Amino acid sequence: MINVTLPDGSVRQYEDGSSPSDVAMSISPGLHKAALAAKVNGEMYDLNRPLEGDAEVAIVTARDKEGLELLRHDAAHVLAQAVQELYPDTQVTIGPVIDDGFYYDFAREEPFSTEDFEKIEAKMREIVDKDYPIIREVWSKEDAIETFKKIGEDYKAQIIDDIIPPGEPITVYKQGDWFDLCRGPHLPSTGKLPKAFKLMKLAGAYWRGDSRNEMLQRMYGTAWANEKDLKAHLTRLEEAEKRDHRKLGRELDLFHLDGMAAAGSVFWHAKGYTIWRQIESYMRRRLDAEGYDEIKTPQLMDSVQWEKSGHWGKYRENMFIVPDFIPEGEEGVEIKVPEDAKLMALKPMNCPAHVEVFKQGQKSYRDLPLRLAEFGCCHRNEPHGAIHGIMRVRQFTQDDAHIFCREDQIVEESIKFCRLLESVYRDFGFEDIAVKLSTRPEIRAGSDEVWDRAEKGLQDAVEAAGLPCEILPGEGAFYGPKLEFQLTDAIGRIWQCGTLQLDYVLPERLGAEYTAPDGSRQRPVMLHRAILGSMERFIGILIEEFSGAFPMWLSPVQVVVATITSEADAYAEKAAEELRKAGLRVEVDLRNEKINYKVREHSLQKVPVIAVVGEREAAEGTLALRRFGSKGQEILSLAETAQKLSDEATAPDLKRVKA
RNA sequence: GCCGGUAUAGCUCAGCUGGUAGAGCAUCUGAUUUGUAAUCAGAGGGUCGGGGGUUCGAGUCCCUCUGCCGGCACCA
């Protein structure tokens, strides 16, 4: 007999060789029906896999996170079986679970098309209906390789050969005639898979994630415990689409993009640039208060500078190179660049120029830490497939700064930075920030003691700011460890925004030094840091975060004064003037349209306040305020409105000063 | 850069198996003076992304380039 401890703490006895399925049945037939797998001593087990002794057993159903993952994993297998039955010339590779679903990578000469999806889904449902038992088998490595090779599954054979560590058992799952290499666990039968799945998209993906390898065809799908959850998920996706910054950017007249005229660069319109200016002013105030010195450095620098900094060697192919010469000849004649023309490059980052500024004049230890900030406009020739809206562009402006300091100042500076970043993000409404600490890579500059101190310094800094942090071992730059601060867009894509990087190498390469108290010449350490990251990307994320309905202080138009009849025109102008005097961004709508029409239009533009004026308001010197997202109205005197709205429109940092 | 998809009016989209373009909204003009999410009428607007080909004839079929979309790879 074996003793089984259930999640509620109770202990039951079962015959030797009993499986989680027996346990579930003994608790209730309902649970047995809902059971998908089990957690045995914390490890996931198939329902029918015999228990090997006393154990803690928890039955997993579709309600558990693990259960849902199991479903999705099975959905991937059912997909693979369906595809191979329909298209026998297809090889299977891998099919993992991802957020909200799964994918499967197939190798096949002929491309699939999304038009095949309907047929494939029908086949998947058929496999579910057949209710094939899913049977786990343990094979030897040699047998497994041989079997998969024999049936032409070269990728599977390669996985077993290269990827699975020796000694680990090779498990194969069979459903009907079809079988697949898999770690498991799986559902007891294909009939347990709810039909709440849907194939979503088709995409290319490199075999084993390496662009030197061949490209496979990846099918993405989503799978849920029931139809209702699936529908809710699809609705969420639709809602997220409405928040897409590219769509809102156009609809709200914030910016436009023109792939033909300037691929990967943003044309900012007045409204979008108003938001930009608010953010820039805000950041400038925050940096001023933190002891930064704002500077401005050249857009074009001689290639010699980039050679010295090391960028030329490593990133040349992503830099825009400009030959320094005067083209001759008539219009229409091809421009010939002389072979000996000096080359310049648009800056891909600001740091070398900041080191140049640091190097001007003599620096003493008394000058440190020296914090040089710049809203630096950078150009990077990004791979074309990487460009995305205003999130990933070829011209962008960083809220960049470099802190030159002594090694013993690193920790304090890092803490100050993390606190500042956390406070800035909170002002913009971001509460959960993902922080990643990338530690020393295999090939690196500097001694282990220096790395020890640097990594610990960054970790302490994040902790001091009260931010949770995940460590990415070996992901740091060769010159130092780094922190990355990530935000998520409307559809769950993660974007790097803020960053803090320690750099011991660049000051050395470019010869930055200061005079120490003992009169010796010393190298400063350099902290590369950005809070928002790129202005473009940050604004893109803000647009999606607020779905275009910006808080008052950022909103490009804060108030629209809309008239009901032309009788109120003069008063409307006067009211707008008063509100502008109070520092508000105000537009007036005197058009000969019904108030319904005006309210609708400005509501669609997500203007925070519509101030309606008719004869009554004009006579009484009041405004009827209607807030975005509400139907009610509030009648206030002109003076009260100016006071109240300008308070509301005060930037968060200035509010703190006032308070 | 790679794989797949896609490109028609300012925007959203229709245009079946080839017979030289349509709708709604927007714009402009006129009427309407209106009380909180679309007042009515009329007009203008497109070498159907560029180039090449098949055909008597191409928005429609083929090739090619470019952009865009979704992934992959990349992201100092």
Image (cartoon, rainbow, N blue to C red):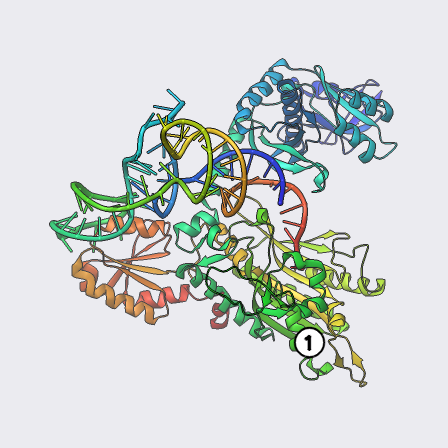
Name the spot of residue A311 as percent of width and height, x first: 69, 63
Residue for badge 1? A369
Q: Residue furthest bottom?
A: A519
Q: In the rendered structure, which amino acid carries the disc numbered 1?
A: Pro
- Residue positioned 60% across, 53% down in the render: A382
Is residue B39 rendered to the left or right of residue B58? left
> Residue A309 is drawn in which quadrant?
bottom right
Seen in the picture, residue A351 relative to A19 is either above or below; the reply is below
- Residue positioned 55% across, 60% down in the render: A396
> Residue A341 is drawn in which quadrant?
bottom right
Name the spot of residue A639 as percent of width and height, x first: 29, 69
Is residue A362 rendered to the left or right of residue A571? right
- Let me know if residue A605 appears in the view: yes
Seen in the picture, residue A445 relative to A123 is either above or below; the reply is below
Seen in the picture, residue A623 relative to A84 is either above or below; the reply is below
Foreground residue, A613 or B16?
B16
- Disc 1 sits on a residue from what chain? A
Seen in the picture, residue A85 relative to A328 is either above or below; the reply is above
- Residue positioned 82% across, 27% down in the render: A170
Q: Secondary structure at mark 1?
A: loop
Name the spot of residue A335 as percent of width and height, x first: 54, 61
Foreground residue, A346 or A295?
A346
| Quarter containing the N terminus of chain A | top right
Q: Residues within 10 Å of mark 1 (few under 14, many from 20)?
A: many
- Let me know if residue A30 appears in the view: no
Name the spot of residue A588 as percent of width and height, x first: 28, 61
Give the mark count.
1
